């Protein structure tokens, strides 16, 4: 996300996914080599998800005073360590193995997926537990979320593929749950002696049925990309023709491929607001659309606010009631533009 004053054109790179017939892992084919993750503000939906995950870990007896933890984090959420420290779970001394190894979207950012899994396995103490939170490839298939593919994000695991890869390290999926965050976030608990319960087995079967091991079904993501990009551009053009002003909200990394693939510019989308001060004053890469503050969004009194992150809808409506008070409407991109009903926020 370059400074708004930095002139166009920006460098452009191919964005492609490939899939292995043997191990079932989907990966980024080539990276730009210049991804700069601009810090964002952790949304309440992600904070709530962290609490749910830690509560589930506590129910399994993984969170207790005296246990040790190592964390692999990412730019997509805050660290779990402060929350675990409050429960008496602390990092080990030096590079010693830990009772608990946590990965919160960390694998997504590892160029060498095999080495990354091996490192996590090596850090497990005897009898230890690996916990991974990830956005499953099955979620992309379920909702046509082709835009989850982007530069800097290397590995797209399904739970069946992850289980197969873990077996090489003497590990396996013990428990697994799916939550609604980002269309379908999965929390996977991994042990050396896994005994998957019915819920975990059902999740693996569901993901397999969706097509995580079927190249013909995976190719459907290309169709989703083509259709949704055309639909987004057509909707914005129709709003402009009707004389309505549309401002975006949520300058997230998953918004970049959507804007790029639809060929949007400031004539169709004059700005995108974001609560992160680090993003304000920049622009979306590949286009002249500036990133502005929420206050600037309100000052523009838009007729429509296009929300690129559906998980934020309740949070932003509560934080910015002036949008609807001035006659504007929120529109969720999920995956097509959908006007949010004007029911009271509470």
Image (tube, rainbow, N blue to C red):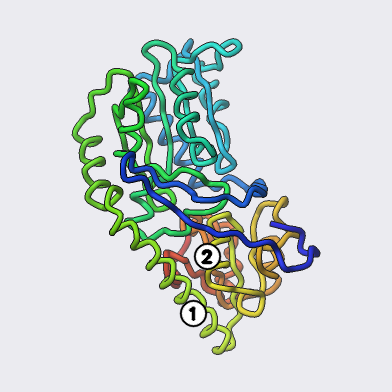
Q: Is residue 258 left or right of residue 22?
A: right
Residue name at image x 42 percent, y 51 percent: 18
Vertical placement of 4 versus 77: above or below?
below
Vertical placement of 104 versus 143: above or below?
above
- As drawn, which residue projects farthest toward the left? 198
Instruction: Give the image quarter of residue 171.
Output: top left
Q: Is residue 226 visible?
A: yes
Q: Is residue 5 left or right of residue 324?
A: right
Question: Looking at the picture, how far across and down is residue 337, in whole percent?
Answer: 45, 71
Q: CA distance from mark 2 to mark 1?
A: 14 Å
Identify the disc placed on residue 235. Answer: 1
Instruction: Give the image quarter of residue 173.
Output: top left
Identify the disc placed on residue 41. Answer: none
Q: First in sequence: mark 2 or mark 1?
A: 1
Question: Looking at the picture, how far across and down is residue 342, in whole percent?
Answer: 45, 70
Identify the disc placed on residue 258. Answer: 2
């Amino acid at each position: 996300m370059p400074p708004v004053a930095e002139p166009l054109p920006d460098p452009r790179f191919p964005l492609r996914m490939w899939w292995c017939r043997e191990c079932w892992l989907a990966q980024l084919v080539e990276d730009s080599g210049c991804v700069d993750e601009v810090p964002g503000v952790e949304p309440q939906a992600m904070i709530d998800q962290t609490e749910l995950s830690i509560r589930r870990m506590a129910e399994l007896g993984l969170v207790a005073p005296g246990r040790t933890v190592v964390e692999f984090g990412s730019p997509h959420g805050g660290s779990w360590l402060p929350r675990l420290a409050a429960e008496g779970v602390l990092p080990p001394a030096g590079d010693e193995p830990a009772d608990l190894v946590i990965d919160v979207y960390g694998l997504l950012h590892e160029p060498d997926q095999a080495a990354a899994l091996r490192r996590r396995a090596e850090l497990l103490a005897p009898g230890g537990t690996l916990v991974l939170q990830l956005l499953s490839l099955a979620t992309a298939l379920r909702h046509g979320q082709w835009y989850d593919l982007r530069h800097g994000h290397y590995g797209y695991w399904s739970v069946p593929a992850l289980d197969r890869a873990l077996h090489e390290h003497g590990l396996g999926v013990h428990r697994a749950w799916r939550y609604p965050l980002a269309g379908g976030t999965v929390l996977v608990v991994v042990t050396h002696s896994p005994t998957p319960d019915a819920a975990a087995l059902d999740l693996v079967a569901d993901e397999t049925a969706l097509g995580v091991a079927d190249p013909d079904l995976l190719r459907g993501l290309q169709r989703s990309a083509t259709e949704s990009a055309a639909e987004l551009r057509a909707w914005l053009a129709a709003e402009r023709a009707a004389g309505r002003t549309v401002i975006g909200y949520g300058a997230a990394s998953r918004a970049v491929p959507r804007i790029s693939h639809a060929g949007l510019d400031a004539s169709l989308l004059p700005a995108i607001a974001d609560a992160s001060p680090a993003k304000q004053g920049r622009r979306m890469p590949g286009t002249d659309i500036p990133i502005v503050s929420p206050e600037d969004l309100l000052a523009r009194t838009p007729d429509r606010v296009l929300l690129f992150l559906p998980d934020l809808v309740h949070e932003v409506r509560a934080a910015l009631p002036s949008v609807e008070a001035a006659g504007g409407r929120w529109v969720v991109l999920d995956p097509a533009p959908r006007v949010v009903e004007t029911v009271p926020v509470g």
